[in-house]
Image (cartoon, rainbow, N blue to C red):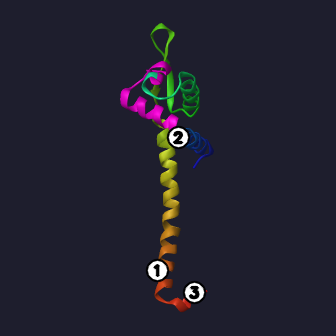
């Protein structure tokens, strides 16, 4: 995978590691764009913490800040970085499938003949 795509995947995984950020993303996915105040009203997270989480989510590219009415910023999801992370995981799984199958085959053969353990 290209370095810039790996960097995107890393930022996504870092963002998803925190349960509060996952809650914010889930709320935006379910309810659509929202302000930090809207999110604070819906979640058991302070407005200040939500602002910090939204900044990290924006840095990861998972949310986009859009100007709203009365200079209130609304945040909406952007799934493009998530698709990059999904491709990264799919490639990793493909790379593991062959060696894991070979190991499983090897271990299955060892179980049948206890004298072959070396």
How many C-alpha atoms fall within 10 Å of the one at disc 3: few (<14), some, or many (≥20)?
A: few
On the image, the x and y values in percent for residue 36 come to 50, 21
On the image, the x and y values in percent for residue 69 come to 45, 10
Determine which residue is flagged by label 1: 108
Give 27 or 65, whichever is nearer the viewer.
Answer: 27
| Label 3 element class | loop
How many C-alpha atoms fall within 10 Å of the one at disc 1: few (<14), some, or many (≥20)?
A: few
Mark-to-mark CA distance, 1 and 2: 37 Å
Determine which residue is flagged by label 3: 117
| Label 2 element class | helix
On the image, the x and y values in percent for residue 22 come to 48, 37
| Label 1 element class | helix
Give 65 or 21, whichever is nearer the viewer.
Answer: 21
* Residue 59 falls in image quadrant: top right
Give 55 or 61, whichever is nearer the viewer.
Answer: 55
Q: Earlier in the sequence, mark 1 or mark 2?
A: 2
For the magenta stretch, what is the residue range?
16-40
Q: Earlier in the sequence, mark 1 or mark 3?
A: 1
Question: Which residue is most to the top?
Answer: 70
Determine which residue is flagged by label 2: 16
How many labels sit on residues?
3
Q: Do the residues under discs 1 and 2 have CB atoms within 8 angstroms? A: no
Give 13 or 8, whichever is nearer the viewer.
Answer: 13
On the image, the x and y values in percent for residue 96 come to 52, 63
Picture residue at 42% right of the left edge, 34% below the top: 26
| Residue 4 belongs to magenta span | no
Q: Quadrant of the C terminus?
A: bottom right
Mark-to-mark CA distance, 3 and 2: 42 Å
Q: Do the residues under discs 1 and 3 have CB atoms within 8 angstroms? A: no
Picture residue at 52% right of the left edge, 40% below the top: 16
């Amino acid at each position: 995978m290209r370095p810039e795509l790996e960097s995107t995947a890393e930022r996504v995984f870092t963002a998803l590691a925190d349960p509060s950020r996952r809650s914010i993303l889930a709320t935006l996915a379910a309810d659509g764009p929202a302000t930090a105040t809207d999110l604070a009203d819906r979640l058991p997270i302070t407005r200040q913490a939500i602002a910090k989480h939204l900044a990290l989510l924006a840095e990861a590219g998972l949310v986009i800040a859009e100007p709203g009415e009365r200079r209130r910023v609304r945040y909406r999801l952007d799934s493009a970085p998530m698709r990059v992370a999904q491709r990264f995981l799919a490639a990793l799984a493909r790379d593991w499938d062959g060696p894991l199958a070979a190991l499983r085959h090897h271990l299955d053969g060892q179980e049948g003949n206890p004298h072959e353990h070396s």
